[in-house]
Amino acid sequence: MDGTNAVVTGASRGIGASVARRFAAEGAHVTCCARSEDALSAVVAGIRDAGGAATAVPADVREVDDVARLAERAAEDGPIDVVVANAAVSHGPPGERPLGDVPYEQFDDTIRTNLRGAFATVRETLPHLAADGRVLVPSGAVAREATAGMGAYAVSKAGVEGLARGFSADLDVPVGVVDPGYVATDLSGGKGRDPEDVAPMFVWAARDAAPDAVDGEVVDLRTWKRATRG
């Protein structure tokens, strides 16, 4: 990924932090975004200490002005080659959030962050996207399979996958979904695969996969392992 200019939202922890670190280790310059300035600064400092290139832009994807500022800052380093619209929230323990019990304010915040935030991230980076750029949106099986107790989070991810397909149909650059399976993050209650172990999936989808393998598709663990089996 030498010379790649990447943007990763939700980069202060979990999958976002792992993807930012892996992209930088592969030679990309990563503009990292998150709401938590201290946690974000720590991730970026770690990348730099390891010899990578990264910039911290504290921003809230729920705020369009913040996302526009993020995109403009990233574009100062040249056209944006890869966008990972990763920022997401989940209110309450996974599997314990029946939709009928979700407060309206939590439902609204989940949709505003996970779905509208992804929309804003893609929309605001589009004017700065390289002609051969790629957009990746993380998701999971809950977007496609009915799972009890996943509440507004599952609804938001179903929307995110529809968003990715819509942008894929409208744009000349690949827009795809990356489904890394169950990953140990705050959103999963710490259960699942180590985020560092799934970060290579995003490198493959961003750099190595044929455009048609990503565009409008769901890249899951099986797809990635089959493609990279040597």
Image (tube, helix red, strand yellow):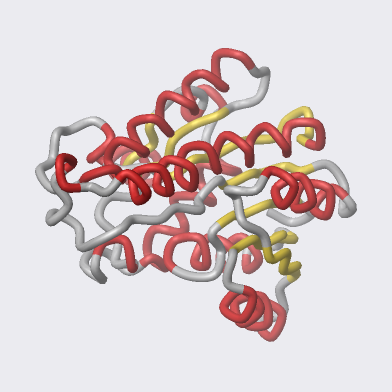
Q: Position of residue 11 (x, y in %)?
A: 56, 63
Compared with 103, 94 (above or below) is: below
Q: Is residue 26 above or below residue 134?
A: below
The quarter of the picture where residue 219 lies is top left
Q: Residue at coordinates 44% horizontally, 53% vertically from top-left? A: 88
What residue lies at 16% left-to-right and 47% top-to-bottom?
Answer: 101
Q: Nearer the viewer, residue 167 or 54?
A: 167
Say which of 176 and 68 sits in front: 68
Which residue is situated farthest in the front direction here? 104
Pick the front one: 203 or 103: 103
User: Relative to residue 207, is residue 194 drawn left or right?
Assistant: left
Q: Residue furthest bottom?
A: 49
- Left/right placement of residue 102 relative to residue 172 reads left
**x and y, in percent, of residue 207 in the image:** 60, 43
Total marks shown come to 0
Residue 187 horizontal side relative to residue 61, left or right: left
In the rendered image of this protein, does residue 217 appear above or below residue 118? Answer: above
Q: Which percent across, then down, holds residue 141?
A: 24, 39
Residue drawn at x 54%, y 59% as measured from the top left: 10
Farthest residue, direction left: 148
**Residue 183, image x and y in percent?**
30, 60
Asked whether 149 or 7 is in front, the reply is 149
What residue sits 37% from the left and 49% below the top? 105
